[in-house]
Amino acid sequence: MAIPIVKATYSLDVNTVKTLERMAKRWAVSKSEALRRAIRAAAANDSPDEGKHLARLDELQRKVALDPAKAARWVREVKAERVARSPRPAKTARP
């Protein structure tokens, strides 16, 4: 039984095409087969629980009781620390 093939046209930048050609040569397959393998590998690496990472971040923020006021304060403190450690002179307000 033949495997149905769908012909498609895609626009790729020069570097991507060169990379695809190197992969095909290294694997001793056609560019189409190299592209199929790359797509399959990328799909296999996709996490079925993509929302899991955001859930972990939400959990961490709940544990440290991070609210908008605390987050804003932290941002101000970090910016002040970076300015204090910067070798460049601090900017002064213009008259």
Image (tube, rainbow, N blue to C red):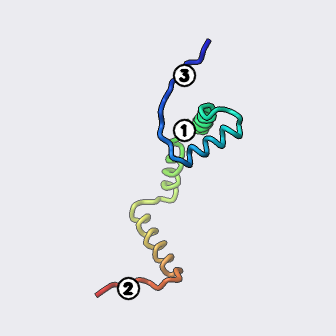
Taking depth in this image into account, of 19 and 37 the one nearest to the observer is 19
Quadrant in the picture for residue 3? top right
Neighbour tally class for label 2: few under 14, some 14-19, many 20 plus, Cα within 10 Å:
few
Disc 2 or disc 3, which is closer to the eye? 3
Neighbour tally class for label 3: few under 14, some 14-19, many 20 plus, Cα within 10 Å:
few
Disc 1 or disc 2, which is closer to the eye? 2
Marks 3/1: CA distance? 31 Å
**Mark 1 or mark 2, earlier in chain:** 1
Marks 2/3: CA distance? 65 Å
Neighbour tally class for label 1: few under 14, some 14-19, many 20 plus, Cα within 10 Å:
few
Mark 2 touches mark 3? (CB < 8 Å): no
Residue for point 64% across, 32% down: 30
Q: What type is the residue that disc 2 sits on? A: Thr
Rendered location of residue 68, percent (x, y): 39, 61
- Report the residue marked by disc 2: 92
Rendered location of residue 48, percent (x, y): 55, 36
Taking depth in this image into account, of 74 and 1 the one nearest to the observer is 1
Depicted 40 relative to depicted 72: above or below: above
Disc 3 or disc 1, which is closer to the eye? 3
- Report the residue marked by disc 1: 49
Marks 1/2: CA distance? 48 Å
Q: Quadrant of the C terminus?
A: bottom left
Residue for point 61% across, 41% down: 20
Which residue in the rendered view is the most extreme toward the left? 95
Q: Which mark is residue 5?
A: 3
Res 46 seen here? yes
**Mark 3 or mark 1, earlier in chain:** 3
On screen, residue 44 versus residue 54, left or right, reads right
Depicted 75 relative to depicted 58: above or below: below
Residue for point 47% across, 59% down: 65
Q: What type is the residue that disc 3 sits on? A: Ile
Residue for point 51% across, 52% down: 57
